Amino acid sequence: MREFGLVLIILALCVAMSFASPYFLSWGNFRAMLMSFSIEGIVVVGMTVLLIVGAIDLSVGSVVCFAMVVAGTAFLAGIDPWLASLAGIVASALIGVAMASFVTLIGLHSFIVSLAFMVIVRGLCLAITDGRPLSLFSLPASFKFIGQGTVPLDLRFLGFAQVYDVPVVILTFLVVVVVFDLLLRKATVFRKVFYTGSNEKAAQYSGIRTNRVKFFCIVLCSTLSGVAGVLYMARFGAAPPTFGVGMELNIIAAAVIGGASLKGGSGTILGAILGIALLSVVSSSLTLLDVPPVWQDVIRGVILLAAVTIDHLLHTRKRARGAVRAG
C-alpha cells in the first residue's frame, strides 16, 4: 500500500506539472530526473537494507567522496582507472568494516559511529587532496563510458516517435535495484535482515547471529557508496573533496518515505526508489517553477520531517494494536 500510494502521488504531481510547465513531460526533463537520482539510488539501496536491520549510516556522502578521491588519486599516480576504481570501492568497504567493528564488537550505536566516521572520512578526503579538487579529464573514454555513455533504445514498435539514448548510469542503477529487490524479497539470507531488525533478541534466540547480519549490512552500504563514487567520478571527470555534503539526508529521506522504518524491521527496495523518485520529481518541479534554491531546501526538509512523523505515528499505532491484542 505504501508503494501504491507513492506511485499515485508521483503520477498526480506529474499530471499537475504537465499543466504548470510545458517542459516537464519532455524526454530531456525525464532523462535529467533519472540521471539526478540514479547514482544516489544505488546508495539508497544500501541504506534501505541498513535501516531494515535497525541501523543507520550518516557517513554515506563522505564515503562516496572518499571512493572518488582514492580512485582519482590512484589514477593520477599512474594506475589503470579500473584498478584505481577497484581500490576506491575496497577502501569504502574497509570504512564499512571499521564502522561495523565499532557497532558489533564494542556495542556502540550506529548513529554515533557513522556520525564520527562522517567527519573522519571527510577529513581524509581533504587531507589527501590538500583541499583541492582532482581534475580527471584525462580518464580514457572507455572508462568514462560507464558514467557518460548511452545505449540506444528503440521503442518505435510501441508507437514512440524516435530512438531514445538511455544513459549507462540509469541501466546500471536499474540492474542494482532489480537484483537487490529480488534478494531482499526472496533470499533466505536477506530474510535474516528483517528478523534482526524486527526483534533482535528473538532473532538471537532463534539462532541468528545478529551481529554478523549487522556487520554485513553496514559493509554492504559502504561498498555500494563506493560504487556510486566511482560512477560519479566517471560521470563528472573530477573528484572534489567536498562532494556529497548533505547527501545522507536525501538518502535517508528517500528510504523513509519509501517505507523503511528508523526503528528497523520494515522496508522495500522498490519503496525506497519510489521515495527518491518522488524527491526528484519535487526538485524538478520546484526548479521549473523558479522556486529559489533556499526555499527548495526548506521544502525538502519539511518532506523529510513529514515522512519521519508518519513513520513514528504508524509504528505507535502498530504497537498499540499489538498491546490490545495481547491484552
Image (spheres, helix red, strand yellow):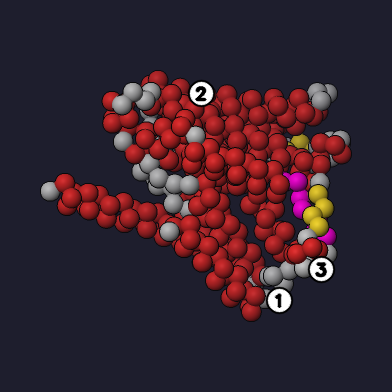
Determine which residue is flagged by label 1.
Answer: 22
Residue drawn at 52 percent across, 24 percent down: 97
Q: Amino acid at mark 2?
A: Ala
Residue drawn at 40 percent across, 45 percent down: 266
- Which quadrant, please, contains the N terminus? bottom left
Residue 168 highlighted magenta (yes or no): yes
Q: Label 1 to label 2, Cα distance in Å?
A: 50 Å
Q: Amino acid at mark 3?
A: Ala
Eyeballing the image, is 14 above or below 90?
A: below
Determine which residue is flagged by label 3.
Answer: 161
> Which of pointers 3 and 2 indicates the residue nearer the eye?
3
Q: Farthest residue to the left: give it.
A: 327
Q: Label 1 to label 3, Cα distance in Å?
A: 18 Å
Location of residue 140 (image quadrant):
top right
Specify whether residue 113 is in view. no
Eyeballing the image, is 77 above or below 226?
A: above
- Which one is earlier in the sequence, the residue at label 1 or at label 2? 1
Q: Amino acid at mark 1?
A: Pro
> Which of pointers 1 and 2 indicates the residue nearer the eye?
1
Determine which residue is flagged by label 2.
Answer: 98
Comparing 216 with 226, the one in front is 216
Q: Residue 180, position in %: x, y? A: 56, 40
Specify whether residue 22 is in view. yes
Crowd rating for badge 3 (residues with CA inside 10 Å; few <14, some 14–19, many 20+): few
Magenta-drawn segment: 163-169
Q: Farthest residue to the bottom: give it.
A: 19
Query: Circles 1 and 3: CB distance less than 8 Å?
Result: no
Residue drawn at 56 percent across, 27 percent down: 95
Q: Label 3 to label 2, Cα distance in Å?
A: 52 Å
Magenta-highlighted stretch: main secondary structure?
A: strand
